[in-house]
Image: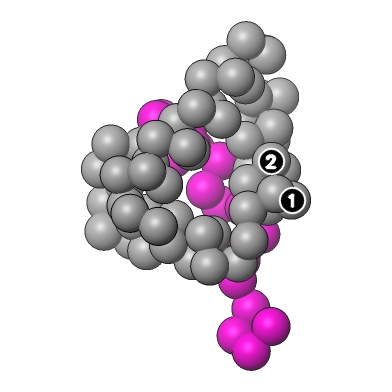
Amino acid sequence: MSPDKLVRMANQIATFFRSKPHDEGVVGVAEHISNFWEPRMRAQLFDALAKGGEGLDPLVLEAADRIRPVRENA
């Protein structure tokens, strides 16, 4: 998936959860990405975050540490 599309999708999730109280929004973003994004997508997101997270919504950046990591050989 293109990096731009991945960022756009993550930001759409953040936009949805922005209507919730802040802490609930952070958890919601992390849980949604962890539960519904396949490992390859999460790996691409972690790669984008490692490169500085350019273009990602602040709510996604804050949720990053709560997103389920991608296990090797899984």
Mark 2 surroundings within 10 Å by alpha-carbon count, few (fewer than 14), some (14 through 19), many (20 or more)? some
Residue sticking out furthest to the bottom: 73
Residue sticking out furthest to the front: 1
Instruction: Name the spot of residue 51 as percent of width and height, x first.
Output: 26, 58
Q: Secondary structure at mark 2?
A: helix
* Badge number at residue 26: none
What amino acid is found at the position of numbered circle 1 in the picture? Asn
Magenta stretch encompasses residue 31: no
Instruction: Name the spot of residue 32 as percent of width and height, x first.
Output: 69, 41
Q: Is residue 20 left or right of residue 55?
A: right
Dots 1, 2 in contact, CB < 8 A: yes
Magenta stretch encompasses residue 71: yes
- Give the vertical position of 12 relative to 52 (above or below): above
Res 50 visible: yes
Q: Which residue is mark 2?
A: 32
Residue nearer the viewer, 73 or 60: 73
What residue do we see at 33% from left, 54% from top?
2
What residue do we see at 52% from left, 59% from top?
41
Quadrant assignment, res 58: top left
Q: Quadrant of the N terminus?
A: bottom left
Q: Is residue 48 left or right of residue 32?
A: left
Q: Is residue 15 left or right of residue 1?
A: right
The magenta stretch is: 57-74
Quadrant assignment, res 25: top right
Q: What's the CA distance linking mark 1 and mark 2?
A: 5 Å
- Give the vertical position of 16 relative to 33 (above or below): above
Instruction: Name the spot of residue 14 as percent of width and height, x first.
Output: 53, 27
What residue do we see at 62% from left, 10% from top?
19
